[in-house]
Image (spheres, rainbow, N blue to C red):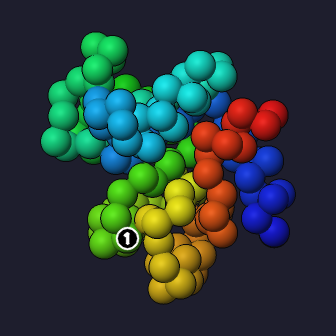
Amino acid sequence: MDNEKKMNEMLEKKVWAIVGATPNTDKTANHIYHTLRSHGYKAYAVNPNYTEMEDGSKCYACLEDLPQVPDCVDFVVPPKVTLKSLEEMDPSVHPYIWLQPGTYDKEIIEFAEKKGFKVVHEGACAMAAVRMR
């Protein structure tokens, strides 16, 4: 399946986890989190370094702590963190993975696809894609 088809399929999913979300309003992860929420998505902030976002919403330490299983997991972290997370994740539980620019390399894409995740990458920013819908 090509990247655009996967993007469209994932954008139909309404519950997202933003791994790397931060209360720092200067960071892209913060903008992605709020853009998804403002466009009708249920977005969960995931970052073990924070307990809440700047708007007072809860920030969770890990995917397992979320009150529901997200339909899509969006990564906004360094490639090393992305790979470690993907190694620990089960694609039957979290099949849809969106990798923001700068969160992956060729090896991470190959690993994720071989493991069975549906992966969006190739410079695809979820924030821009949501705004274009």
Residue at x 57% of width, y 29% of height: 35
Percent position (x, y) of residue 57?
32, 17
Vertical order, 5 against 18 (above or below)? below
> Quick check: 43 left or right of 45?
right
Q: Quadrant of residue 122?
A: bottom right
> Quick check: 30 left or right of 1?
left
Percent position (x, y) of residue 93?
50, 51
Residue at x 31% of width, y 72% of height: 80
Where's the C terminus, which quadrant? top right
SS at badge 1: helix
Residue at x 41% of width, y 35% of height: 30
- The three-letter amino acid code for the residue at tag 1 is Pro
Q: Quadrant of residue 118?
A: bottom right
> Quick check: 52 left or right of 123?
left
* Residue 114 visible in the picture: yes
> Quick check: 54 left or right of 30?
left
Location of mark 1 (residue): 79
Residue at x 79% of width, y 47% of height: 8
How crowded pointer 1 is (Cα within 10 Å; few <14, some 14-19, many 20+) is rated as some
* Frontmost residue, 104 versus 28: 28
Percent position (x, y) of residue 83?
37, 71
Residue furthest to the top in view is: 56
* Frontmost residue, 94 versus 19: 19
Where's the N terminus, which quadrant? bottom right
Percent position (x, y) of residue 81?
30, 65
* Frontmost residue, 76 versus 2: 76
* Residue 87 visible in the picture: no
